[in-house]
Every structure is written in structure tokens, then in C-alpha cells.
Amino acid sequence: MGKRGMAVARSRKGEGAAPVSAGMGSSEGVIFMLKGLIISYILTAGLLLLLALFLYRFSLQEKVVNICIILIYIVVTFFAGFATGKRAGSRRFLWGLLMGILYFGVLALVSLAVNRNLQDISTNFATVFMLCAGSGMLGGMVS
């Protein structure tokens, strides 16, 4: 059997054929991104509750609390970018970047809806955006 005959025989059996995946561009990819965002915000809520407990128990200073909040954003978007990059397979850094940007976008929208302005994140708006996007991209790169 020639090379072409072997390839046809393998593809019929399913052996050696490239796996078929939905990819991140399909509706399954969009659903995965939404699930990732929901899980990210559940993780964020849990870590913020833990921070609130530490604040209550140890009377942390406001500066320490602000640093911890930003660290929570960084850690959560890193893991979201990591998970998204694992799922994407190719161009992982772009998918991680997208997850970080989406995370920040939801964060900004919720802040706007609750406070009617972006005052809570406006002082650090660009910094928090860069940290969320950058850590999401780094997570995608590491995946």
C-alpha cells in the first residue's frame, strides 16, 4: 500500500487522524468564556470575603486592603487566562488577554451600575486595566 492508501486506511479507522475540536471561535468557545468569567467572579467573591474576614480580625490598614484587592484581580485573571489558554490551544496569549479584558469590562460595568460612576476604579482605571489584561495574557502564555 502506498502512502496515500495508508492515510486513507488510518482516517477510516480513526487512528492517526487529527482530533476534531470545536475551537474557541464556535458557540462552545463563547460558552466556555462565559463560564470562565462566572467562575472567575465566584473566585473573586470568595477571596474578597476572605479579605473582609482578615480586615475584621486584624484591623488591616486601607493601603494594605487596596493592595490585596489588586492582587486578587491579578491572581484571578491569571488563572482565567491560564484556563482559557489551555482550552484554546493556539494563540493562547490572545485568548488570555481577551479573558483579562472581559474580566475588567465586567468589573467596570458592575462598578458603574452600583455607584453610578467609576469612582471606585477611576483613580486606578488604566492601571487596573493593564494589570487585568496583562495577567490574563501571562496566564494564557504560561498555559
Image (cartoon, rainbow, N blue to C red):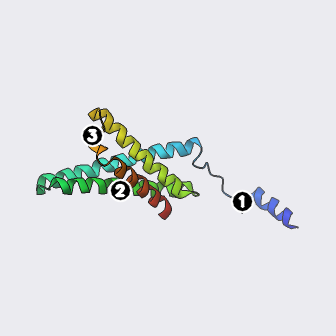
Q: What residue type is labelled 1?
A: Ala
At 85% from the left edge and 63% from the top edge, which residue is drawn? 4
In percent of width and height, residue 94 lies at 53, 54
Q: Which residue position holds label 2? A: 74
User: On the picture, is 138 further left or further right than 49?
Assistant: right
User: On the picture, is 82 further left or further right than 113?
Assistant: right
In percent of width and height, residue 35 lies at 45, 45
Between 58 and 74, the one nearer to me in the picture: 74
Rendered image: mark on residue 119:
3
Q: Nearer the viewer, mark 3 or mark 2?
A: 3
Q: What residue type is labelled 2?
A: Ile
User: Label 2, label 1: how many angstroms apart (C-alpha)?
Assistant: 39 Å
Instruction: Tell me, yes or no, whether the two marked residues, 2 and 1, touch with CB atoms within 8 Å.
Output: no
Q: State which tag comes first along the sequence, 1 or 3.
A: 1
Q: Which amino acid does label 3 sit on?
A: Gln
Crowding near pointer 3: few (<14 within 10 Å), some, many (20+)?
few
Q: Which residue position holds label 1? A: 17
In percent of width and height, residue 100 lies at 43, 50
Q: In this view, does 111 lie above or below 95?
A: above
